[in-house]
Amino acid sequence: MTRTLDLASNVAIVSGSSRGIGKGIAYHLLSKGATVYLNGRSLDELEHTFNEFGEQFPDQVCKFQGDLSKTATIAGLLKAINNENGHIDIVVANIGSGRSQMGWDIPDNLWEENMQINFMSAVRLSRESLRYMMDAKKGSIIFIASIAGVETIAAPAPYACAKAALLSYMKNTAPVAAQYGVRMNAISPGNIFFSGGTWDKKVRENPEPTQKYIRDNVPLQRFGTPDDVGSLVCYLASDDASFITGGNFIVDGGQTRSI
Ligand SMILES: NC(=O)c1ccc[n+]([C@@H]2O[C@H](COP(=O)([O-])OP(=O)(O)OC[C@H]3O[C@@H](n4cnc5c(N)ncnc54)[C@H](OP(=O)(O)O)[C@@H]3O)[C@@H](O)[C@H]2O)c1
């Protein structure tokens, strides 16, 4: 018997989804029938994405402008969503940034900024979501980490360490959440290309060395796309993945080498 992955009647939040990978994740969740809360700090970009998705999914797409790295803002949003819908089923902690400094002589403020945006924002969103999901005895939390948190690649140490901490948080908390029927997993993307993103800028600024980097390091010989991540999020959020928790799923075209 074939089954179609269906997320209708699920309510989802994707932090940082006005552009990039988060936008791709939101699109896939919408296309599987979920109600999705888009989020970003810049209103213009958020409105643009909301209107774009609204043409195709007018009854499913919602938006929340605000800084979802802050506990009070997260708590306010979750309360409002729960009041409106009665449940919160899927939370994707996607906010993060690789902007930092290479090398060893990195000032405290850059370490702290990286931990806040790449680690604490996800811890806070999942912790506040767990309050609702544990009560409901169901839910799926998915963290967008990075292969930089899995292996040493050419990424700034504060970013790599923050993403490694995020994977450790997920692995340590998943068994606790599992007792309440809540699943927690992570996706670690490799080099994800989208218009206006980091890799787009690198290709524009240094086309040949950037393409060579991909050729030399990625066995599948291409960048990943937000769709590559979005389709996996849908699977992990669905009942098809009901036996999967505490997993880190690498989406990198074969770039990482460790077993
Ligand atoms: N791109 C890659 O190749 C790659 C590879 C591996 C992992 N990742 C990870 O994937 C995730 C997404 O990366 P991306 O490249 O798509 O990032 P991006 O292009 O910088 O997009 C980030 C999104 O998050 C929003 N955002 C940032 N800070 C926020 C905050 N405090 N509160 C609410 N919204 C916020 C941004 O909108 P505003 O700026 O308007 O708030 C935007 O919608 C990150 O965790 C990143 O580390 C990316």
Image (cartoon, helix red, strand yellow):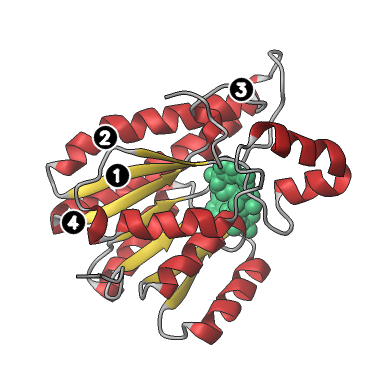
- The CA span between labels 4 and 1 is 11 Å
Q: Which residue is under mark 4? A: 138
- The CA span between labels 4 and 2 is 15 Å
Answer few, some or many: residues within 10 Å of disc 3's Cα (few below 14, many 20 plus, some between 14 and 19).
many
- The CA span between labels 1 and 2 is 8 Å
- The CA span between labels 3 and 1 is 25 Å
Q: Nearer the viewer, residue 167 or 99?
A: 167
Q: Which mark is residue 157?
A: 3
Looking at the rendered structure, the secondary structure element under dot 2 is helix
Q: Which residue is under mark 1? A: 184
Residue 164 rendering spot, x and y as whole percentages:
46, 27
What amino acid is labelled 1 in the image?
Met
Answer few, some or many: residues within 10 Å of disc 2's Cα (few below 14, many 20 plus, some between 14 and 19).
some
Q: Is residue 258 above or below residue 97?
A: above
What amino acid is labelled 2 in the image?
Thr
Residue 32 rendering spot, x and y as whole percentages:
38, 72
Q: Is mark 3 within 8 Å of ligand 1?
A: no
- The CA span between labels 3 and 4 is 35 Å
The first of marks 1 and 2 along the sequence is: 2
Q: Which residue is under mark 2? A: 173
- The CA span between labels 2 and 3 is 24 Å
